[in-house]
Image (cartoon, rainbow, N blue to C red):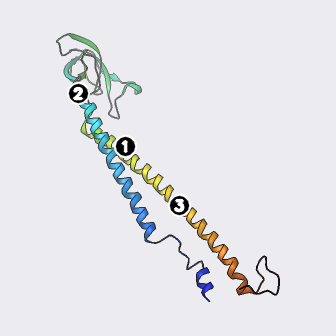
Amino acid sequence: MDHHKRSDPRLAPSGRGPGKRAALILVLMAALICGAVAAGSLWNSGAKADRQLASHRHQVQATTTGPAKDAPAAARYGAKPQGVAPAVWEQPDHVRRSGTIHVPPRTPQGRTVTIWVDDTGTPARPPGSAADRALASLSGGSVAAASVGAIGAGALLLVRRRTEARRLAAWEQEWEQVEPVWSGRPRRGSAPGTDDA
């Protein structure tokens, strides 16, 4: 019977063939492209910011005037252990300055260390390095790629569920037409003894 072949749910298209693979590949490619664009943008903007910052940062030699003490946790720059010590230095326009600077732990009094200062001669963070910029770019690119991939996968899942629901509804409607022929049960809305097959 032709009805059997059309109604068998195993023979109905399920949307799991080459179209689904192509859609997944498309989402993956879009995610990778967006991640690469985001990483490139972050690299370029970071490089521009680092160049601008570097034009206002200067390395000077400072001499400690006391022994180093442990730095407070809130004042540490990253994971590298540091201490703080009083010191004197000359800012770029040869004005003598003094203050507290970050030094390696256990730095003795009288040791000369290189520090970064801003245009006013105040100790400041060094300009960003290429490694820091690369890490920030890769992190941002990864987040962008993951976000686009998640949104694309969610959209594919939603489309698949809607398609599956429509397919199952169509199968159910077709089954209502075919099942009485197989079972001999009257169809809904038809009187017993009539044959409208």
Place of residue 56 in the rendered image (x, y in percent of width and height, measured from the top left): 23, 22
Residue at the location (76% across, 87% down)? Answer: 195
Q: Identify residue for label 1.
A: 140
Q: Identify residue for label 2.
A: 54
Residue 193, relative to residue 63: is it above or below?
A: below
Q: Please identify the residue farthest to the right as the structure is shown.
A: 192
Split into 4 quadrants, where in the image is the C terminus?
bottom right
Question: Of 107 and 52, which appears nearest the observer?
Answer: 52
Report the amino acid beneath label 3. Answer: Val
Place of residue 196 in the rendered image (x, y in percent of width and height, measured from the top left): 74, 85
Q: Quadrant of residue 99?
A: top left
Q: CA distance from mark 1 to mark 3?
A: 29 Å
- Mark 1 touching mark 2, by CB under 8 A? no
Q: Residues within 10 Å of mark 2 (few under 14, many from 20)?
A: some
Q: Which badge, 1 or 2, is on the more N-terminal residue? A: 2
192 left or right, relative to 31: right
Report the amino acid beneath label 2. Answer: Ala
Q: CA distance from mark 2 to mark 3?
A: 50 Å
Residue 193, relative to residue 14: is it above or below?
A: below
Q: Which is in the foreground here, disc 2 or disc 3?
A: 3
Q: Identify residue for label 3.
A: 159
Q: Which badge, 2 or 3, is on the more N-terminal residue? A: 2
- Mark 2 touching mark 3, by CB under 8 A? no
Q: Quadrant of residue 171?
A: bottom right
Q: Residues within 10 Å of mark 1 (few under 14, many from 20)?
A: many
Residue 172, relative to residue 33: is it above or below?
A: below
